[in-house]
Amino acid sequence: MKPFIRCLLVLAFSLALPLIPRVGAGVRPPPDPDPLPSITPIPIDDPTPPPETDIPIRATVYFADTTLVSTHSIQGRFRLVGLHLNEAVNVIVQFPPALANAVFAIQPLDGGSISPNTPTTSAVGGAISFQFQAGNLPGLYRISIIGSGGTSTLSFWVADPANVQANRPVANPSH
């Protein structure tokens, strides 16, 4: 190799050497020219309470023997209510007055039947009523109540006399 070219290569390598990161040496990015200032939150005294996320809903189940059981929803779910095989009950679901005249769809999820089988409009006080008849098998029967931007689930349990250990606790254990 000619001495002139060798000299140019040595010069180029010596100029580039500081720019090449060394093995094991941490490469740090250049400092941020305009760092963001730290932000301190400003406390706000707001007398308005936060909106309710769980609208209180009460369901009352009326049995043919004139007894009844009442339960309320927690995050859209009601406590289990005990029924017998093929038993028919009348149900009144009471919503807050703000939901008066709202339209609700009522659907059985696990069998059984609903009457009336059409969307129901809540009354002036925010109540809807329907009749539910359980199926002919033991187990869980859920009713979905959909309307006004939310869903609630009313649950019934039909006990299995042949498998008592599988039965779940209900709001009306003496039924």
Image (spheres, rainbow, N blue to C red):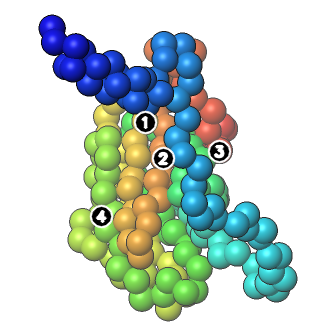
Left/right placement of residue 22 relative to residue 130 reads right
Mark 2–mark 1 distance (CA, rounded to whole Å): 7 Å
Circle 1: is it few (<14), some (14-19), or many (20+) Cα within 10 Å?
many
Q: Residue at x 42, y 88 (%)?
A: 101
Question: Distance of mark 2 from mark 3, alpha carbons?
Answer: 11 Å
Q: Which amino acid is tagged 3?
A: Ala
Mark 3: secondary structure: loop
- Whether residue 85 is visible to the viewer of this picture, yes or no, is yes
The spot of residue 157 in percent (x, y) is: 49, 37
123 left or right of 95 in image: left
Q: What residue type is labelled 4?
A: Ser
Q: How far apart are marks 1 and 3 (CA)?
A: 14 Å
Q: Do the residues labelled 2 and 3 touch (CB within 8 Å)?
A: no
Query: Which residue is rendered at x = 52% and y = 29% of the image?
Result: 27
Looking at the image, tell me whether mark 2 or mark 1 is earlier in sequence order. 1
Residue placed at 47% from the left, 59% from the top?
A: 152
Circle 2: is it few (<14), some (14-19), or many (20+) Cα within 10 Å? many
Q: Name the residue under label 1.
A: 140
Q: Can the viewer see residue 58 in this picture?
A: no
Q: How far apart are marks 1 and 4 (CA)?
A: 19 Å
Q: Mark 3 points at which residue?
A: 171
Image quarter (top left, top right, bottom left or bottom right) of the N terminus = top left
Viewer-proximal residue, 57 or 90?
Answer: 57
